[in-house]
Image (tube, grey):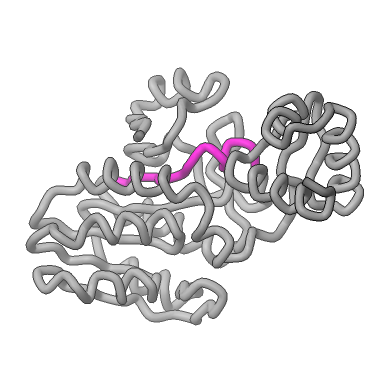
Amino acid sequence: MSQTFRQPDILKIAQREGKVTVEGLAEHFGVTLQTIRRDLTELAEANKLERVHGGAILPSGTTNIQYEERRTLNQSSKLAMARACAAQIPEGCSVFLNIGTSTEAVAQELLDHRDLMVVTNNMNIANILIDNSDCQVIVTGGALRRSDGGLVGTLTIDTIRQFKFDYAVIGCSAMDEDGDILDFDIQEVGVSQTIIAQSRNSLLVADHSKFSRTAPARIASMRAVSTVVTDKRLPGNLPQLCADWGTKVIVAG
């Protein structure tokens, strides 16, 4: 495979896994370690990856991956997490579903739930749940973010404050090694903080790629959420921290 075709595939693997290794890529593509090192160096020089010992990770930054691209990442993991998350939500309750491709996957898994009231600031989720006739759907209002169908701003926050939800499902863009939940959009951060404050049980749904990413705005600590649903074991000391905080961790799939 030529460099022209190999490097876009390397980026797709990095976006899916959060990190790539020289040895793993060399085996995957059937090329030498030196060839992969050269590819990674060129991708790093183009600010598409960040070189680390033995491989590369997605670069730190202040902007998120494009929404349509995020929808295609880690689809099997998102499905497993969505099923595990939906299993924590009983019928006959109130639920808030936030912006994000993982929360949209959860909405799909709630299509057979009965007697739900779902409040959302995600136009995509509202459209998904139209197909559940036994689900009341309330849209918060707010400023429409055309890139992903999200509603944000003071009107969104003011609407959320009118409720006390049994359950809330939120996503994030990154998770720090100290347990901080991070995002890119400061307006969305304010919405997420309000959702957590207005919920009896809050569930964070985030796949393993978020462990190796960074984002500039802090939502909260994992200490503030009831449950973390992910697809791989939390790295480092996070399992012990969550145990100390009383935050339940579910590893799906």
Q: Is residue 141 left or right of residue 117?
A: right
Image position, residue 245 (x, y; %)? 40, 26
User: From what the image shows, is residue 171 above or below residue 137?
Assistant: above
Q: Is residue 127 left or right of residue 244?
A: left
User: From what the image shows, is residue 123 above or below residue 71?
Assistant: below
Image position, residue 70 (x, y; %)? 55, 58
Question: Residue at horizontal 59%, vertical 39%?
Answer: 17
Q: How many marks?
A: 0
Q: Which residues are magenta?
A: 202-213
Q: Is residue 103 left or right of residue 153?
A: left
Question: Residue at horizontal 16%, vertical 70%?
Answer: 132
On whether residue 169 falls in the magenta region, the answer is no
Image position, residue 11 (x, y; %)? 71, 49
Q: Which quarter of the image is occupied by the C terminus?
A: top left
Image position, residue 163 (x, y; %)? 25, 65
User: From what the image shows, is residue 219 above or below residue 104?
Assistant: above
Question: Residue at horizontal 88%, vertical 53%?
Answer: 46
Q: Is residue 166 left or right of residue 69?
A: left
- Decide which of 154, 80 is in the foreground and name it: 80
- Decide which of 217, 57 is in the foreground and name it: 57
Question: Residue at horizontal 55%, vertical 25%?
Answer: 235
The answer to which quarter of the image holds residue 187 is bottom right
